[in-house]
Amino acid sequence: MILGVDPGTRKCGYAVLAAMGRRPEAFGIVETDALPALVSQLLTRHAIAAIAMGGGTHARSLCALLSGLGVPVLIVDERDTTLRARARYFADCPPRGWRRLVPRGMLLPPRPIDDYAALLIAERYLESAAAP
């Protein structure tokens, strides 16, 4: 299993993913200060082999904090994850009412989507690990 993390200044998205195409085992958004404690809990509940950290804001400092937990922390390119996370969110939660008439490229999700970005980061890591 892989733990994907979308690092941010105030909040981080996280997703525990066993394999491509499967639903995440754990998925959510947590305050950045609470991330190390959450990762410790996730490590006890899931057999996480590595942490795939998006290379964005605060990635280096969070890598330093998480590297002491005994699991490799790897930086993954997070280019285009915000746009792809928005599309993935609307695929999972299609707009209703009048919002379904608005082109999806013009819609903004009603909540933060850092968890979807973390899922995409974990999938990107799994794709690169599977490539020859």
Image (cartoon, rainbow, N blue to C red):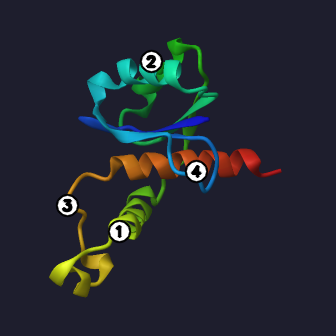
- Report the Cα–Cα distance between label 2 and label 4: 21 Å
Residue at the image point whose x is 59% and y is 20% from the top: 71
**Residue 40 visible within the image:** yes
Q: Say left or right for 54 vs 20.
A: left
Label 3 amino acid? Pro
Q: Which residue is mark 2?
A: 40
Expressed as whole percent of the image width and height from the top left, the position of residue 80 reads: 46, 60
- Quarter where residue 109 is shown: bottom left
- Report the Cα–Cα distance between label 1 and label 3: 10 Å
Residue at the image point whose x is 22% and y is 55% from the top: 111
Label 2 amino acid? Ser
Q: Say left or right for 14 vs 30.
A: right
Which mark is first along the chain, 1 or 4?
1
Q: What secondary structure is found at the residue carrying circle 1?
A: helix
- Report the Cα–Cα distance between label 4 and label 1: 18 Å
Label 4 amino acid? Glu
Q: Is label 2 in contact with label 3 (beta carbons under 8 Å)?
A: no
Which mark is first along the chain, 3 or 2?
2
Which mark is first along the chain, 3 or 4?
3
Picture disc at residue 123: 4
Picture disc at residue 90: 1
Which mark is first along the chain, 3 or 1?
1
Residue occupying the far bottom of the picture: 101
- Foreground of the two, 75 or 109: 109
Q: Say left or right for 43 vs 8.
A: right
Q: Is label 1 in contact with label 3 (beta carbons under 8 Å)?
A: no
Q: Which residue is mark 3?
A: 110
Q: What secondary structure is found at the residue carrying circle 2?
A: helix
- Report the Cα–Cα distance between label 2 and label 3: 30 Å
Tag 2: Cα neighbours inside 10 Å, few (<14), some, or many (≥20)? few
Residue occupying the far left of the picture: 98
